[in-house]
Each structure stands twice: as C-alpha cells, then as structure tokens.
Image (cartoon, rainbow, N blue to C red):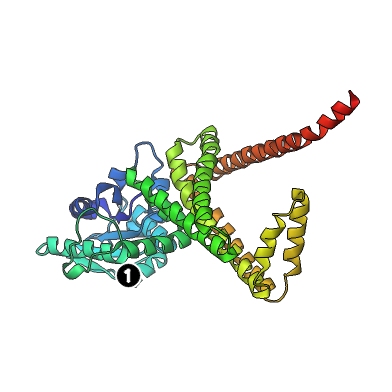
C-alpha cells in the first residue's frame, strides 16, 4: 500500500502526472506513490484495487489539467457526470474516507466552481489547491514534497527539502502521528507498514515491545508487585512468545482459507493488533487497581498474601475473589465502570483492526470470517486439551494410595 495516491485523467494530464510521479518516487520511494497502471497487479479487479488503495493512503493528489472538468467520452457526454467515471469515483471515495485531498493544478488549470461539479464532488472545491507551473516546476514540486513531509509525516530516505527544517519530522512526532492514526484508522496504518522491507518487521517488533513494556509497567507498579524488574522481563518475554505461538495457527487458518500469505506477514499484522489490545486491557486493569487502592491502600498486599497460603488453588482463588468483591464500593465501582468502557472501546478497536488481515490479503468478508473462526476453534481445542491434561495429571497422584491399599 502507498502513502500518496495520484488521481488523474490520462487524456488530460498523463504527461504532467508522470513527471510529478517521477519526482515523488525519486524522493519518497516508488512503493509510497500509487499510479494506477504502475501499481495494480495484472489480473486484479481494477475498481477494488483503486478503492482499497485510496482507503489505505495518507493523502490523495488530484491532478487537475485544462480538460479535467470538460473531458468527454465518445458520445460527447461529460465524464464527471457519469457515476462510473474513475476520476469521480476516486475523489468520492477519498472524501467518504475523510482523507486529505490536495488538488494539484497543472498546465495553467484553474479550480472548478462548485456549481460546475456533481453534488458529490462539491466538497472538492473547498480543498486547498497547489499549483505546479511550467516556469517554476521544480521549485513548486519541492514545496509540495516539503508540505507532504511536514503535514503528513510521509517517510523518506532523502533529506527534507524545506530550508530551516520546515519539512523535517522527528522520530517522536512521527511516532505520535502513527499512534494517533493507529487508534483512529488502524487498517490504514497497518497496511502502509507492509512495503516488503525488513524495516517493516523491525517497526512492528519495536511497537509491540513498547506496548508490552508500557502495559506491564502500569500493572506492575500499579499493583505494587515486588521485584518489578523481574516481572517486566518475564512479561515482555511471555508476550513476545505468545504472539509467535498464536501467529502459527493463524497463518495456517488463512492458508486453509485460500489466502496467499506467510508467517512473517501474519506476525507483522498481529503484532500491531496484540500491542494495541494489550495497552487497552492494561489501561482498564490499572483503572480498577487505582479504584481498589483508594478504598484500601493495602488491598494488593493482602491479595498476594492469599496466594502464599498453604491451601489448594481453588480455595485461594475463592478467597481472593471474595476479598476483591468486598472492596467494590464507592471509587472502586466508579473506576470499574470506566475500565469497562475502556475494554469495550478496545474490543471494538480490535474488531475494526482485524480487518487489516482481510485488506492485506485481498480476500472477501466470508473467507476472512472463516479464517478467524478456524483460528479461534484451534485455540479453543488447545485450551480444552490443556485443561483435560491438567485434570488427568492432578488426579493421578490421588490414585496411587488407592492402588496400594487395594493391593
């Protein structure tokens, strides 16, 4: 998926669009610029490919030339008036997705008036346009590139073009922007983090490590657990191992359902989902812990002491549950309500973000649902088998005295 989507009409601005695309690809890299004939795989559904590319983009550049408004088909009908016109569909799709749309005026073109456009395109006239003139082409293109870098944090291996650092986006600003977009448009960000470079997997790894660390720190220090460093290390390793283990049956489930994917791609996507979900879960748990500590500052010390008692585990669990229920008054109840809302938001976000698998693998809703259900069924089978094995192992020592007494 690309960051910059170029919308243009071939009979109007083919040459100017190619010139601009070459300049953008030179600076940002070819994988970050989408051109229809150059970015769609042969045999793909053109309409679906265009729609998916727009929804996953960061910004849409609508190249407007002298004939953009009045271009007509063989029958003399204006193309923009046709519901199936690709330029119209592209801009409509971008506006529906609330993507930034930048009209780029070339070859002396002017912005069309709202009255001259179909009603669905009227918001396009309110988009701030930029002009690329023939006499100042390189300078205008450089200003556009600097604007894309500064406003939308589109990454590039090339240095920023604007003087005085206007086009520079530091690591922390880019991370903040990525976190914001991950929260609002998770599928879009995850899709753009799959360029095929090794850096994609490094970013996913660093992201999930940071999420695990932040979530675990909140739980460890919020609960006042002894030996916090040990808990953090164990929690980090456990989370990473769990992601790898859960990704194996998930990869198999997608392959069974016909998706062409591999373990690395599944792990990359799942890392973002797991990291975001873990942060949401830990935030809710921390809210409940804060509420309980307001009621009883020593509650977790007494809670941990229960598990050190020489009692069977079911009894210890029952006593611990009774302790927490007894403290569910006043502030603890209020914080639990807030935590429940956070968990509900996190669950909704996870469902939306799960769509990144379907969009990345290019499969339909039914096939995606089948893969998800197959994965959940495999997990349920593993958990059920582990529970059965635990019961068998727990009952084995109790049989030994019976065998000896009977003998």
Which of the 4 image quarters holds residue 380?
Answer: top right
Q: Where does the image place residue 86, in percent across and percent down from the top left?
A: 36, 53
The answer to whether residue 227 is left or right of residue 150 is right
| Residue drawn at the location 44% of the way across and 62% of the way down | 96
Within-10-Å neighbours for mark 1: few <14, some 14–19, many 20+: few
Which of the 4 image quarters holds residue 398?
Answer: top right
Location of residue 347 with respect to 399 vertically, above or below: below
Which of the 4 image quarters holds residue 61?
Answer: bottom left
In this view of the protein, which residue sits in the foreground, 312 or 275? 312
Location of residue 115 with respect to 305 vertically, above or below: below
The answer to whether residue 316 is left or right of residue 180 is right
The answer to whether residue 349 is left or right of residue 149 is right
| Residue drawn at the location 74% of the way across and 60% of the way down | 321
Most extreme residue toward the left is 135
Q: Secondary structure at mark 1?
A: loop
Q: Where does the image place residue 88, in percent across and percent down from the top left?
A: 36, 58
Q: Where does the image place residue 74, in percent across and percent down from the top left?
A: 30, 49
Name the residue that disc number 1 marks: 127
- Whether residue 353 is visible to the viewer of this picture, yes or no, is no
In this view of the protein, which residue sits in the foreground, 191 or 57? 191
């Amino acid at each position: 998926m690309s960051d910059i989507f170029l919308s243009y009409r071939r009979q109007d601005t083919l040459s100017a669009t190619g010139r601009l695309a070459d300049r953008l690809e030179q600076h940002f890299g070819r994988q970050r610029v989408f051109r229809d004939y150059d970015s769609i795989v042969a045999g793909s559904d053109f309409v679906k490919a265009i729609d998916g590319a727009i929804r996953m983009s960061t910004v849409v550049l609508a190249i407007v030339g002298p004939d953009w408004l009045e271009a007509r088909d063989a029958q003399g009908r204006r193309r923009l008036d046709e519901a199936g016109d690709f330029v119209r569909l592209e801009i409509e799709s971008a506006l529906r997705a609330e993507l930034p749309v930048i009209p780029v005026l070339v070859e002396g073109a002017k912005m069309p008036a709202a009255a001259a456009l179909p009603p669905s395109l009227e918001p396009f006239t309110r988009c701030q346009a930029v002009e690329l003139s023939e006499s100042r082409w390189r300078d205008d293109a450089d200003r556009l590139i600097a604007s894309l870098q500064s406003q939308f944090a589109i990454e590039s291996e090339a240095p920023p073009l604007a003087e005085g650092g206007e086009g520079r986006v530091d690591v922390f600003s880019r991370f903040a922007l990525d976190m914001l977009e991950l929260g609002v448009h998770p599928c879009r960000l995850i899709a753009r983090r799959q360029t095929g470079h090794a850096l994609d997997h490094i970013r996913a790894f660093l992201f999930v490590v940071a999420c695990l660390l932040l979530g675990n720190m909140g739980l460890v220090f919020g609960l006042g657990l002894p030996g916090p460093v040990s808990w953090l290390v164990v929690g980090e390793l456990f989370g990473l191992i769990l992601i790898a283990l859960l990704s194996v049956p998930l990869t198999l489930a997608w392959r069974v359902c016909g998706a062409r994917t591999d373990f690395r791609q599944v792990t990359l996507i799942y890392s973002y989902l797991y990291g975001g979900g873990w942060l949401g879960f830990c935030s809710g748990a921390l809210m409940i812990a804060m509420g309980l500590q307001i009621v009883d500052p020593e509650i977790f010390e007494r809670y941990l002491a229960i598990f050190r008692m020489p009692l069977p585990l079911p009894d210890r669990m029952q006593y611990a549950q009774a302790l927490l229920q007894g403290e569910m008054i006043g502030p603890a109840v209020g914080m639990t309500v807030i935590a429940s809302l956070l968990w509900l938001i996190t669950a909704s976000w996870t469902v939306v973000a799960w769509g990144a698998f379907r969009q990345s693998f290019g499969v339909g809703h039914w096939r995606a649902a089948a893969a998800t259900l197959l994965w959940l069924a495999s997990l349920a089978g593993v958990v059920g088998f582990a529970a059965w094995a635990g019961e068998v192992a727990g009952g084995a020592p109790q049989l030994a005295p019976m065998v000896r007494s009977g003998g």
